Image (tube, rainbow, N blue to C red):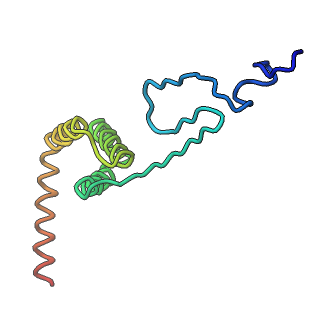
Amino acid sequence: MSGTEGDTPSRPAERRGETGGGNVSIGAMRGGSVATGSHGVATSVNTTAGPSPEHSELLDAIRAMRSALPGENSSAEDRALDGELAEAEAEIVRDGTAARSSLTRLLAGVRGWLGSNAAAAGAVASATAVVQGIAQLLA
């Protein structure tokens, strides 16, 4: 071997303090960090702001509605609505918001469920008004 320090398998350019001159290309990335080179450092800081007050209220309402749906004796419509509510809940928890398309789909689902359960929904609304009226009189 000669006395020069050329690129050999045992002594690459990076180990001699030189750069390799390579390129890194990332087409798309969501989350995470990337470091390149012999002294590269990757730092990742992730923050979650949490849902807006409006989305927090919707999240509370979604959770209340899911808990009010029948459990064991639920209909196919109840189970379908619960699935839609669960998807919206997960989206708000994960992203802090819900996409307009998700909200539109959920609104249609809730309206459809209410339409098929109109008599029960009307009775619940009437019962709520009666309970509130009695509570005010007893206070």
Q: Above or below — where is 39 with respect to 28?
A: below
Q: Nearer the viewer, residue 46 or 88?
A: 46
Q: Above or below — where is 37 with respect to 138?
A: above
Give x and y (percent) for residue 118.
Answer: 13, 46
Determine the residue positioned at 13% across, 58% down.
Answer: 125
Give x and y (percent) for residue 105.
Answer: 22, 35
**Left or right placement of residue 95 versus residue 40 in this view:** left
Determine the residue positioned at 75% across, 19% down.
Answer: 7
Question: Hey, which residue is sitting farthest bottom in the picture?
Answer: 139
Quarter occupied by the N terminus: top right
Give x and y (percent) for residue 110.
Answer: 20, 42
Q: Nearer the viewer, residue 31 or 56?
A: 31
Q: Nearer the viewer, residue 112 or 45?
A: 45
Quarter occupied by the C terminus: bottom left
For residue 13, which quarter of the picture?
A: top right
Question: Hey, which residue is sitting farthest right in the picture?
Answer: 1
For residue 20, which quarter of the picture?
A: top right
